[in-house]
Image (cartoon, rainbow, N blue to C red):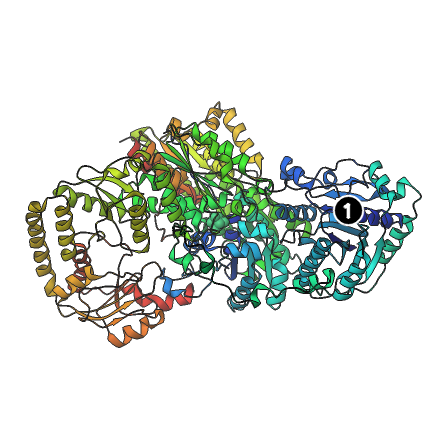
Amino acid sequence: MKQIAIYGKGGIGKSTVAAHISAALANRGLKVMQVGCDPKHDSTRLLTCGRAVVTVLDYLQKTSPDQRQREDIIDVGYGGVWCVEAGGPKPGVGCAGRGILTTFDLIKKLGVMDSGLDVVIYDVLGDVVCGGFAVPLRYEYADEVYIVTSGEFMSLYAANNILKGVHNYDIQPRLGGLIFNHKGLAEEELRVQRFAAAVGLPICAVIPRSEDFAIAEQMACTLFQSSHSKLHSLFEDLAAQMAAEHQLYPAHPLDPEQLEELILNRYVMPSSKDIAYEDKASKLTPDAPAEKATTLLSLNVRRREPLHGCAFNGAVNVAIQVQDAVTIAHGPRSCAHASYQTITSAGRKSQFERGVSMPAHILPPLISSDLNEGRLIFGGISELRKRIIEVQACQPRAIFVVTTCPTGIIGDNLEEIMDLDDHHKTRLIALEADGNISGDYLQGMITAYVETARALIDPHITPAGELVNIIGEKTIASVTEPNLKIIKELLRQIGVGINCRFICQTTVGEIAGFKKAPLNLLAYDDYMGRLMRDHLGLNYGAEFYSRPFPRGFEETSRWLAEIAAFFGKSDLVNGIINAYEELYRLQIAGLRPALEGKRLMVVTYNHDIDWILEPALDLGMEVCLVGILNYSQDNHFRSRFKGQFPLIEPYPQDRRLEDVARLKPDIFLSNHALSAYDSGVFTDVIPLCPQVGFLSGVDLAQRWTQIFRHNINEGWKRDAALYRKYLA
Amino acid sequence: MRPCTENIWPDAFSGAIFALEGIRDVVVILNGPTGCKFYHSAISDYQYPRDLSFDPLNYPEIYYFGQPRVPATFLDGNDYIYGAASKLEKILQRVGGKPQYKLVTVVNSPGAALIGDDLQRLARTHIPQVPCICIENTGFSGVFAEGFQNALLQLLSHLNPPGHQGVEPYVNLVGLSIYHKHYRGSIKELQRLLSLCGVKVQTTMCCGNSLEELRNFTRARLNVVLDPDYGLEVCQWMKSHHHMPYLLPASGLPLGFEATERWITQVCSALGVNPLPALEDIESCRARAFLHLSRYNSVTGLPRGASFAVKTEPALAAAVTIWLHSYLGMLPAAIELLPSIHHCTAQKLEDYLRCYGLHQAFHSKFMDCGADVLLSDGNTLGQAQLLQKQPFCGIEISLPSLGYLDVVDKSLLGASGAMLLIEQILNGLRFVYS
Ligand code: SF4
């Protein structure tokens, strides 16, 4: 079987040429199939006498997988030619390239290629040379490639692009040559000849302009059926040439400058890369308004690092925190599934380990628009509208729609659903994360924060009362709720309440009333926290307290005193701090006998570890090394104890074992314990999100005391060899 | 606001990844963003642990992103426009060259599947010496089991097995994945029962076999389908391409005593071996179960009449429902089935319920009607705990898990699976009826 791909710019007449080649090949007694790879699906029209062929993509949409049959997608046309049309979406929607991929997939699955065919002709649109339209160029398909072109510049430009596509795929020569289809333009022939010579291809056929084609078109049949045209022999010769063994050529595409010079016969300006850029700013008139910087980017995106996670997932994780809203993941189910399981894994863990129910993480208000292949080819907006209307019936206060990579790639436009936004009942908030096209997980969170604030915060409210908002809690950290409890209690003791947690376990109403709180508290002073602080300050006049949630005795004392001062409650603070101080001193005294003089080594991503160093130093421990790992989200290591311990920052990951062996610490602290396989040292884990409040560090030290007091040595750690023997 | 959401089940994309991840020395390269990678790597590592620590510093290589499984090309927006050939080239050379991998597989993420890079060509060009299969499109929102079977089929058709030998009484168990609850224990249990009758399990396909073990699938005399959604097409393929007979036991999954007895009897009779040793073993388990059931029943009258609800895939739901009803005398209140490929299993279950006038359960949901026992996945159980006012007992029969760490392998299938279910039900009902 020989497979031949015929490429060419849309409208150049390649379908007419392809149909005549198929017909001529069939007249030679060959069993031929023609596959139209153009969403217009009129490639085989002349062969089927104008009969509309059921397109493969329409068929796939309407027929369940177990009922699909080869015969259903094949129409038998002139000369017994099997006619198949891929079909595809309307221009501007969906993904026609994916449609071609799907068509080839089905053809293969249904065993069409194993049906004793002699020749398969692929008639392929060549304006778009994305992966989908390039499928016929794959080695399992086209053995030969022909390009139909006229002498118009755009047609030759498309021909050159096709050559580039072939070039990318080729290991061995596969080009048969050009088929020149006259448009009747001046010097057209010369241009095509120049192009053919430059790219090293023969012109296999020259098809003149002829009234015969118009007549055949009108009668919806090939010239072989409509007339005794002189052109019969032209296609018969071409078909004979194709059917025989002949020389094939490699692809040598021209670069754009060469192409213009060659075809338009003119001097081409040097390309922009050869010209030094002018300073655009100097061209601005003095009174041109400066653009306000509004695009907030995650560090990952700004630094163009490999993206960690996808913006879709980040946006979903924020959106589901709004308890009276529903989030629709717009895309295939796999995206919603991965997101859903990530969210619920925190909820299941909390429920299982601590019996604490985190409703947003147990029953996240998330559904999927479940786009299938058909929807992705033809566009998913209508399916999405249906989902929104279904969800509206549950009467949420808001619906978030978050887009995934596939819906971003096919370009589903969320503007088209915004007519469903109902300001009085259910707000509709579009979060165009486009999977990871817009960035990483944190970029998605930023998008969700910004768009939710824009849609929901009531700008007319003025701050009043003794209330604070909490900003930037880590929604999936297991410590978030226990920490909130501690903070809430500290605030309660100075008579301050919480207005809105932006955005964690909150409601549409609480976000709307965001501006009621005169003061805002950052949960974490990391990149994301600072970004949100600046954004909410700039756009909503939010006033922030300068420090994040406190850890350890010293920090918590100051935090509480300064917040109390803001609300004019300083008189309440001393009594509270004194009571905690007494407790802290008592606990340190109890722990000292077990830990004094012990050597502590810390390697961590955490950039604020004073809450560990404070009790360690108060306990008289020796901090023999602190290594700070590089972590792109937060690069501000600081310590009020600097100078009292050796510090390596950034700490190279692979030095751990060497340093442990050299320094022989009694305790090695890290975010993950060293594997029992590689070390004999006692290791403990620092949580990435630690506990807040006066006693955070002391609670950690309590664990170590137990271990030293009882001189615990785990027998299982001696079984590494057994692991190697039986399981590794 | 009325709750209108429920657990979101995995689709064919995950099915394909978990099929291939279930083979010991195969690497699955995900041609896609880390957004798709992190979850699949975490689940694969959890379900089929092969590394000692969660410490990301142990997996510093760029494509692994601190995880031990499923290296990825970390595609971004540019790659969707320009194609991912250069990233693929690098990852294929770096990861594909590792000696511990006997086969490289490349699976496109949903986004990558749309742009159509020619994976096979890239693999042929950049790692010509390494066997490689590429799955360009696993399907969008398709049934999990379909993705599983398609991937397995692609893998099997790539292997070059020896001709069908089938002399020894060896079987392949087809239709379990590493994404099945207690898959390891279930396989061990079936292996145990079969070995009592002198039958050896050649492969379980995607549940921890090496590629070499899998390649020798033709040594088995018989392929046994466990769940048709996960294994029937594969067995049909092995029949047409390797002339291997297969058995789709009429009793369905070997879950519960009677179904296990029928299953063993059918397998043994197809192989011409004596099922008695296994049947005796099952009998002794039944005796023990009887002791406990009798004592429990004498005090409480239960489990007879206690109600139950099931939400899972059809084959498992059918096996559980029929057994709890026919053996323990429990009453189905709600049966919710996940999407499947073969609708006949669901139909059989509905027919069974209709026979006893219980088919109403087919149209009821646990969240609406409640029940004493709910058998489902961890998410559904957690949600029920949040929403259900009435006490109930939850039993995990599907993933995801609520988080209980199983150090001892447990089984859902076979005699010990039946014992485990009885144990969980009896203890659970004590809580419900206390
Ligand atoms: S396809 Fe894109 S949106 Fe979906 S999970 Fe993967 S990275 Fe995220």
The quadrant holding residue A93 is top right
Residue placed under numbered mark 1 in the picture = A15
Comparing A271 with A618, the one in front is A271
Q: Residue furthest top?
A: B357
Q: Is mark 1 within 8 Å of ligand 1?
A: no
Residue A118 drawn at (x, y percent): 81, 52
Image check: A636 left or right of A211?
Answer: left
| Local SS, label 1 | helix
Q: Amino acid at mark 1?
A: Ser
Residue A18 drawn at (x, y percent): 79, 49
Q: Chain of mark 1?
A: A
Q: Is residue A29 above or below residue B302?
A: below
The quadrant holding residue B428 is top left
Image check: B397 left or right of B215?
Answer: left
Image check: B149 left or right of B324?
Answer: right
Q: Is residue B103 visible?
A: no
Comparing A30 with A286, the one in front is A286
